[in-house]
């Protein structure tokens, strides 16, 4: 994960593993928004990275798209927010074999400060 810029409000913008934008996932079968544990799921444009909600302990995760629905990810945040941009808790990042806080990390909706 690397810092890729700053928002107009001075928040850090991050790009993780080549993605900086996650889009709401849509089910190929029904064309409807993809829900996991009653929350929307988001995937990178190349569909390799995802953001989803795990209902156990109210946890949002960012990780491999293959792990959607599990409690396995490289970014984890225990917050029961209905939408990821409403998360107020601090994210934790897996880095060099241990979990570290990432207080500068925030998910921002495209229509918010990070919009181009």
Image (cartoon, rainbow, N blue to C red):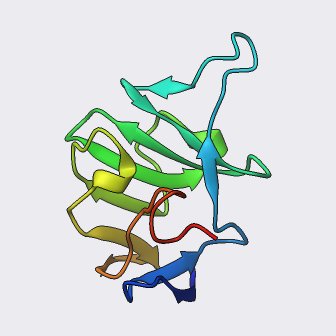
Compared with residue 71, is residue 86 higher up or lower down, i.e. above or below? below
Indicate the position of residue 27 as horizontal and vertical percent values.
Answer: 67, 21
Residue at (22% x, 50% y) in the render: 79
Compared with residue 40, is residue 51 higher up or lower down, i.e. above or below? below
Report the number of numbered marks. 0
Residue at (56% x, 25% y) in the render: 34
Depth order, front residue of 51/83: 83
Indicate the position of residue 110 as horizontal and vertical percent values.
Answer: 54, 58
Residue at (23% x, 41% y) in the render: 58
Depth order, front residue of 111/20: 111
Quadrant the N terminus occupies: bottom right
Residue 97 placement: quadrant:
bottom left
Compared with residue 63, is residue 52 higher up or lower down, i.e. above or below? above
The answer, for residue 78, to whether it is visible in the render is yes
Compared with residue 17, is residue 4 higher up or lower down, i.e. above or below? below
Q: Check the image and name the residue furthest to the top.
A: 30
Direction from residue 49 to residue 110 in the image, left or right: left
Residue at (45% x, 62% y) in the render: 112
Direction from residue 101 to residue 30 in the image, left or right: right
The answer, for residue 96, to whether it is visible in the render is no
Direction from residue 6 to residue 39 in the image, left or right: left
Residue 4 placement: quadrant:
bottom right
Indicate the position of residue 64 as horizontal and vertical percent values.
Answer: 62, 51
């Amino acid at each position: 994960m690397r810092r890729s810029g700053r928002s107009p409000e001075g928040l850090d913008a991050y790009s993780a593993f080549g993605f900086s934008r996650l889009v709401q996932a849509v089910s190929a079968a029904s064309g409807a928004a993809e829900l996991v544990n009653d929350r929307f799921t988001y995937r990178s444009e190349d569909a390799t990275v995802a953001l989803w909600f795990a209902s156990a302990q109210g946890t949002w995760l960012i990780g491999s798209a293959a792990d959607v629905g599990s409690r396995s990810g490289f970014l984890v945040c225990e917050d029961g927010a209905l939408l990821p941009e409403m998360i107020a808790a601090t994210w934790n990042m897996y880095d060099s074999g241990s979990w570290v806080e990432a207080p500068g990390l925030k998910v921002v909706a495209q229509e918010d400060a990070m919009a181009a």
